[in-house]
Amino acid sequence: REKIIKELTELIPVVIGPYIAYVENYRPKEYIDEVKKKNGRTLLVMPSHSIQGMNVEYDIKQFIQEIEKVKTEFDTILVCVYYEDLKKGLWKLYREKGYGIVSAGNTGSPYFLNRLKYIFSISDAVIANGATTGLAYAMHMQKPIRLVRQNIDFDMPCHNNVLELEAESQVENMHKYFGGKEFVLSEKQLEYADYIFGLNRVKSKEEMRKILLPLLKN
């Protein structure tokens, strides 16, 4: 994205890495430690989710089968469901299996990322069925990821074939690095995640001030 913006515009892009790096945790460390002690080793399930203007459909029962294959490695299973899918009742099959349901709410909330950071904080590993932004957040927080290959249908009124082809290419690369059978966090994964998500481009508060203050003066 940085390269494309430089080539096609007069803007000066600044890569800052995953947004979640810039928010405080929704809960204090003492609270998090107590929850982790209570829940034990926890698997966070991150299904592909709908957003405003785009509906996502996938075989939930098939995804549950993949979760069940690794269930014995964990004491607690938490499924993070976005609010659009909560409204549709797409949490019910997960709940029937005895999984806990968590949500960071609506992206319009000023505390959305704070809640999401807390959810990652109480988890030990992540399983997902799509290459979503959540993977960037998981990598930033050093959570091992397993990406399950599954057909995901995206229903969007606006359709851009160029973006779709680029996305498909990146998804294949994501499966190459994160599609293994074990929950591991390797150097190759971190290197690729840095290329895609800019993990090593996170800025300090002082660095952000130096970037933003001159813009305010203009």
Image: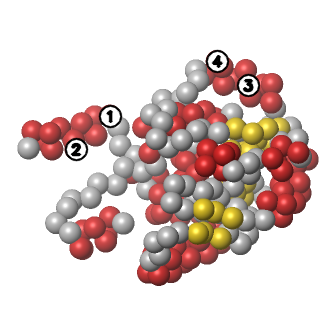
* Callout 3 amino acid: Val
**Which tag is nearer the camera, tag 3 or tag 1?**
3
Q: Real-space Cα distance between discs 3 and 1?
A: 29 Å
Considering depth in this image, is 128 or 159 the residue closer to the camera?
A: 159
Disc 1 and disc 2 in contact, CB within 8 angstroms: no
* Callout 2 amino acid: Ile
Please, what secondary structure does the residue beneath circle 4 have?
Answer: helix
Label 4: which residue?
A: 30
Label 1: which residue?
A: 205
Question: Which residue is at 45% across, 34% downward?
Answer: 110
Quarter in which the N terminus is drawn:
bottom left
Question: Which residue is at 78% across, 65% downward?
Answer: 59
Disc 4 and disc 2 in contact, CB within 8 angstroms: no
Q: Is residue 189 visible?
A: no
Please give the label number shown on residue 35.
Answer: 3
First in residue order: circle 3 vs circle 1: 3
Considering depth in this image, is 72 or 128 the residue closer to the camera?
A: 128
Horizontally, residue 215 falls left or right of residue 156, namely left
First in residue order: circle 1 vs circle 2: 1
Disc 3 and disc 1 in contact, CB within 8 angstroms: no
Considering depth in this image, is 6 or 57 the residue closer to the camera?
A: 57
* Callout 1 amino acid: Lys
Please give the label number shown on residue 211.
Answer: 2
Please, what secondary structure does the residue beneath circle 1 have?
Answer: helix
Q: Real-space Cα distance between discs 4 and 2?
A: 34 Å
Q: Real-space Cα distance between discs 1 and 2?
A: 10 Å
First in residue order: circle 3 vs circle 2: 3
First in residue order: circle 4 vs circle 2: 4
